[in-house]
Image (cartoon, helix red, strand yellow):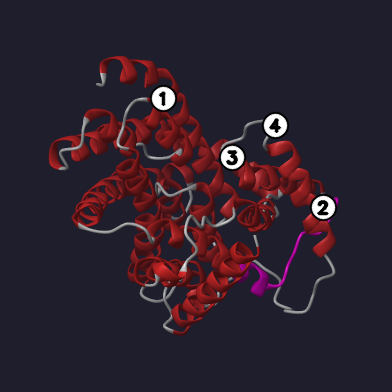
Amino acid sequence: MRAKILTTLVLVLIGGVGGSVAYWLKLPLPFMLGSLVATALVGLLLNRYVPQGYVFPQNFRLTFLAIIGVMIGAQVTPDLLNLLPAMLASFTAIILFVGLAHVGNYLIFRHIGGYDRPTAFYSGTPGGLLESIAMGEAAGADIATLTMQQFLRIILVITLVPIGLSIYMGGPVGSAGGMTLAHANPSDFSHLHEVVLTGLLGILIGKPLRLPAWQLTGPLFAAAIVAASGFAVLDLPNWMISVCQVVIGASLGMRLGGLRGRAVLRGMGLGLLSVGFMLIVGLVFSLFLVQLTGQPLDVLIVSFAPGGVTEMALVALSLNANPALVTAHHIWRIILTVIELALIGRYVRSRAL
């Protein structure tokens, strides 16, 4: 236990160094991406120094997910709620996006990658990482390949989307450009107890309700109710948000650390094809929806980008887009994906597509 705690602290420190270097280089989403790269390199090059069987502690990660959820939910205001009816078109478009993305990904992984049918099907889901892995294993998919492709989907999206938006906008965006939704005073902890209590409440209600990505969405919904009602002020210093990004980046980076060989190179190539395809589809929908919804193009692009709820919420938070509105689209995407998997799952297991 002591070795696991010490290893986790060292990895977080390494992630913090990586995040600081990325911030100095003015990279998009620096603290999460820098931490991810630094810890992935540790897993690849210094794996012999990591205790055998080590897994980044999920309960530790949960704390920081909850904080991010609270900070996102705190952005829900009456003005935001008034926007939701106007976003009906984009929520409808997400239904089409999920279907098109999954079909296109299946064709990529099956006919270009040569994966067996269950592996191709579950590798191609545009959301629901844990659900896809669990159902794919039951259907006889190659679990190592499936896990790699699902994590590569998330990692490639959270890398390419901020970089693409930086190029589109002609300069650094998000936290690299100095934008934040957190409190400017680094020593102001006057609302910390409100954030903690709201996060705990969200965790307690999120899991029993089986919310998608409940570690994030439970606190998010709790914070949304608190913020919209004006019951409390939910605010934290900016550096605490950066620490959350470092921890989440470190946990993702360690997932990549054990992957090696030609399978990784092939998986990376297929992941680029898959993510590129989904981003193009999302861009087409976004261009079409700009006039219908009145939302900026970058907000819509992030809303359709097929990363995980947590990671894309952080992208929205960093870009100073409205993260609550963006997260609502991603929760809807994951709900639709899970429903699709539940409906088709039996057919996949019995017929192997």
Q: Which mark is residue 340?
A: 1
Q: Give the left or right position of residue 317, taking residue 208 as reference.
A: left
Q: Earlier in the sequence, mark 1 or mark 3?
A: 3
Name the N-terminal-most of marks 4 and 2: 2
Helix, strand or loop at disc 4?
loop
Closer to viewer: mark 1 or mark 3: 1
Asked whether the residues under the numbered discs 3 and 4 touch, taking CB atoms below 8 Å apart as contact, a structural biologist would say no
Tag on residue 84? 3
User: Above or below — where is 233 with respect to 324?
Assistant: below
Residue bearing the label numbered 4: 208
CA gap, disc 1 and disc 4? 22 Å
Residue 132 is situated, as x and y percent measured from the top left of the image, at: 41, 35
Query: How would you rate the neighbour count of disc 3 (Cα within 10 Å): few for under 14, some for 14-19, many for 20 or more?
Result: some
Earlier-in-chain disc, 1 versus 4: 4
Q: Amino acid at mark 2?
A: Leu
Q: Amino acid at mark 4?
A: Pro
